Amino acid sequence: MAPVLWALSDLAVTGDPLFSLNSTSALAEALGRDRGIAAVPRAFVSFLSDTARPPVAAAALGGIALCLLAARPLGLRALHVLAALFGAGAITFVGVGVAGLSILPRYLTVPVVALCLFAAIALAGWTLLEAGHARRALWRGGAIAGAVLGVLAVAVVKADAPGRFATELRYLRAVHDDLEAVLAVPAVQDGLRCGPVTLPNYRLVPDTRWVLDVGEADVIARSDDRRRAAGLLPSTGVALVAVGEKNVRRIGRADGTPRTTNRLPDGFREVARNRTFVAGVSC
């Protein structure tokens, strides 16, 4: 059901039901991302640990061990459900590699959910044991001690996480506001009549298309290897460049793309500037 809904959303937004699939493959090739079945084994282990976070992954291993030790009192049905969930997600991840798609952590979301549930069993599975079970008190004590230590560790290591999250949200909002502002400048609007908008790379292509409500051909990444190799990058229209150290690092550069893409192309003159972007026009 999920793939069908995904394809329908692609069809509604882009007009192409396979847009996400094709775009992901093309982008993986351009950025040199790990692809294919050979990259799956190493990525599977590292992505599971990184996505679930080491403390949760460790708790999940403990939960799996406890499930095996106490399988009979816990009931095998619950264990089978979690194992099936993990297995289905793992098979999907392998399928992504077989299909030649980019191997990314988000494709392990389902196995990570299973790991989180196993971690929950490590912390609260003792409640499933009968009141007089020999292991109930021991399991409960270990779970409470582990939870307290985990909370203290997170409080120390991640004390600044809420502040960093809020800062990141403010930054993304500011970038979007600056994008809207620079595209609304009259000189930039005039330049749009001469050709498409080009950006340093793929990062802000969807946002720009959304802001302008235009099609795929109207917003182009200058990092597109095929266009650059064929000499098909537009010589007229609007070119946006990121300015400022943080902006250049976050939106002006991308893996596998030359830094020269974050410069105004020859023939484009600067017509607008704000804290995030410089806009050039050529007609």
Image: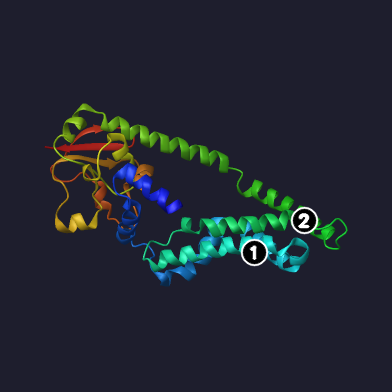
Left or right, 138 with reference to 208: right
Residue 267 picture location, percent across and down:
12, 42
Q: Hey, which quadrant is residue 40 in on the image?
A: bottom left
Residue 115 picture location, percent across and down:
61, 59
> Disc number at residue 128?
2
Residue 10 picture location, percent across and down:
35, 47
> Disc number at residue 80?
1
How far apart marks 2 and 1 lie (CA) works out to 16 Å
Whichever of labels 2 and 1 marks the residue nearer the N terminus, that label is 1
Crowding around mark 1 (Cα neighbors within 10 Å: few <14, some 14 to 19, many 20+) is: few
Looking at the rendered structure, the secondary structure element under dot 2 is: helix
The type of residue carrying mark 2 is Leu
Residue 203 picture location, percent across and down:
34, 47
Crowding around mark 2 (Cα neighbors within 10 Å: few <14, some 14 to 19, many 20+) is: few
Q: Relative to 174, is 80 above or below?
A: below
Looking at the rendered structure, the secondary structure element under dot 1 is: helix
The type of residue carrying mark 1 is His
Residue 53 appears in the figure: no
Left or right, 238 with reference to 91: left
The residue lying at 27 percent from left, 35 percent from top is 212
Q: Relative to 94, is 163 above or below?
A: above
Residues 58 and 133: in front is 133
Residues 233 and 93: in front is 93
Mark closer to the observer (2, 1): 1
Residues 132 and 5: in front is 5
Direction right: furthest residue: 132
